[in-house]
Image: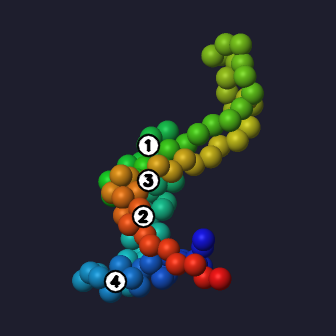
């Protein structure tokens, strides 16, 4: 299904072409945004970016018999969960597909 990959620099070019903001400023804002999202997630908050969706942390670990036993040693894996917004989901549903082969 994938038709390639779009990187941060390419997205900055697209955003700059659709706004009055320079490509360099777009790039800088997006880099700062990714750092701000990471900081917010590390504080345990859900990051909700309106039309894009929300990000949150999920933890996997070993069970414990009490709350006191839970801690860094029982956590085995930390993941970032992404939930797309309804707006983005609806936009993607409008995609048309053509067979390549």
Circle 3 crowding by C-alpha within 10 Å: few under 14, some 14–19, many from 20: some
Q: Is residue 36 left or right of residue 63?
A: left
Q: Nearer the viewer, residue 35 or 17?
A: 17
Circle 2 crowding by C-alpha within 10 Å: few under 14, some 14–19, many from 20: few
Res 46 label: 1
Instruction: Work out whether residue 37 can be spotted.
Output: yes
Q: Secondary structure at mark 4?
A: helix
Q: Residue at x 57, y 49 (%)?
A: 80
Q: Secondary structure at mark 1?
A: loop
Q: Position of residue 97 (x, y in %)?
A: 50, 74
Q: Position of residue 19 (x, y in %)?
A: 27, 81
Q: Residue at x 67, y 13 (%)?
A: 66
Mark 2 = which residue?
92
Instruction: Work out whether residue 24 can be spotted.
Output: no
- Marks 2,3: beta carbons within 8 A: yes
Q: Residue at x 59, y 39 (%)?
A: 58
Q: Position of residue 99 (x, y in %)?
A: 58, 78
Query: Quick one: label 4 or label 3, which is nearer the N terminus?
Result: 4
Disc 4 from disc 1: Cα separation = 28 Å
Count of residue discs: 4
Mark 3 = which residue?
84
Query: Quick one: label 4 or label 2, which is nearer the N terminus?
Result: 4
Query: Quick one: label 4 or label 1, which is nearer the N terminus?
Result: 4
Query: Quick one: label 2 or label 1, which is nearer the N terminus?
Result: 1
Q: Nearer the viewer, residue 101 or 91?
A: 101
Mark 4 = which residue?
16
- Marks 2,1: beta carbons within 8 A: no
Circle 1 crowding by C-alpha within 10 Å: few under 14, some 14–19, many from 20: some
Disc 4 from disc 2: Cα separation = 22 Å
């Amino acid at each position: 299904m994938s038709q390639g990959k779009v990187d941060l620099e390419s997205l900055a070019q697209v955003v700059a072409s659709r706004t009055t903001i320079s490509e360099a400023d777009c790039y800088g804002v997006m880099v700062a945004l990714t750092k701000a999202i990471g900081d917010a997630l590390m504080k345990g908050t859900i990051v909700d970016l309106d039309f894009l969706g929300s990000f949150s942390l999920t933890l996997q670990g070993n069970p414990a018999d009490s709350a006191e036993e839970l801690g860094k040693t029982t956590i085995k894996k930390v993941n970032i969960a992404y939930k797309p917004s309804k707006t983005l989901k609806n936009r993607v549903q409008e995609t048309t597909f053509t067979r390549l082969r």
